Image: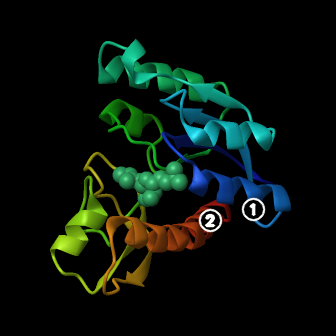
Amino acid sequence: MSRLPIAILISGRGTNMRVIAERAAAGSLPVDVRVVVSDKSSAEGLQAAAAMKITTRVLEGRQFADRPSYDRALIGLLAQYQPKLIVLAGFMRILTPQFIEAFAGRILNVHPSLLPKYPGLHTHRRALEAGEAVHGVSVHFVTEQLDGGPVVLQAEVPVLPGDTEKTLSARVQQGEHRIYPQAIDWFARG
Ligand code: GAR
């Protein structure tokens, strides 16, 4: 089976990126990670990607006057790698309608809540404050509505007595690492 060319966008640790790239390298996920792009040169995930011999690029947000000019540059950068799917993996920027239009139906995101609950930031803290018994993670297609595009797959995790943001987010991340490769696999297989 031919491998789908993808680009992975990160801002931080890049643990989701790592799981996806490892699965691709092992041949258990039919994708070719053409490039890993970060909006922060300090993102830990960049080193992990480089260690896996994946091309990395940095496009710092502060070098651009506004969101549209950043996204134009990002579209131009990505065009060099011809990805058929854009994988947002902890990429902490809001994308413009122009970017979303350029890759319409071809952008996936992982969001740390059971959407439509808790779009936006600080999802674990908000779930704890609300006294939720169940929390989780969603993989969804990206549309112009922030964290509002069609959900592909979700994983639930229990909220346990004594949980903190840290313990809860670690449990949610285990779910992310399970369902994000699965959703990408489905996309790659059509
Ligand atoms: C993940 O928990 C992901 O759900 C979250 O960022 C983290 C990135 O982790 N994404 C968002 O909050 C998007 N709004 P990673 O860098 O270790 O993959």
Please say if the residues under marks 1 and 2 sit with CB atoms less than 8 Å apart.
yes
Residue at coordinates 41% horizontally, 82% vertically from top-left? 157
Q: Position of residue 89 (x, y in %)?
A: 51, 50
Residue at 35% across, 30% down: 98
The three-letter amino acid code for the residue at tag 1 is: Arg
Image height check: is 39 above or below 156? above
Instruction: Let me know if residue 46 appears in the view.
Output: yes
Q: Quadrant of ligand 1?
A: bottom left
Give whichever of discs 1 and 2 has the lower sequence position: 1
Estimate how packed mark 1 is, as few (under 14), some (14 to 19) or many (20 or more) residues with alpha carbons within 10 Å: some
Which dot marks residue 8? none
State the quadrant of the N terminus: bottom right
Residue 29 located left or right of residue 147: right
Amino acid on which disc 2 is placed: Pro
Residue 168 spot, x, y in % from top left: 39, 72
Residue 115: x and y, percent?
Answer: 30, 69
Q: Label 1, label 2: how many angstroms apart (C-alpha)?
A: 8 Å
Q: Is residue 139 left or right of residue 52?
A: left
- Is 175 on the left or on the right of 123, as rendered? right
Look at the numbered disc 2 and give the secondary structure of its residue. helix
Q: Quadrant of residue 96?
A: top left
Q: Is residue 127 above or below residue 58?
A: below
Q: Quadrant of residue 155?
A: bottom left
Badge 2: residue crowd in 10 Å (few <14, some 14–19, many ≥20) = many
Expressed as whole percent of the image width and height from the top left, the position of residue 29 reads 74, 63
Give the residue displayed 83% in from the left and 62% down from the top. 27
SS under mark 1: helix
- On screen, 20 above or below 28? above
Q: Which residue is mark 2?
A: 181
Q: How many marks on residues?
A: 2
Q: Which residue is mark 1?
A: 23
Residue at left offset 54%, top offset 36%: 43
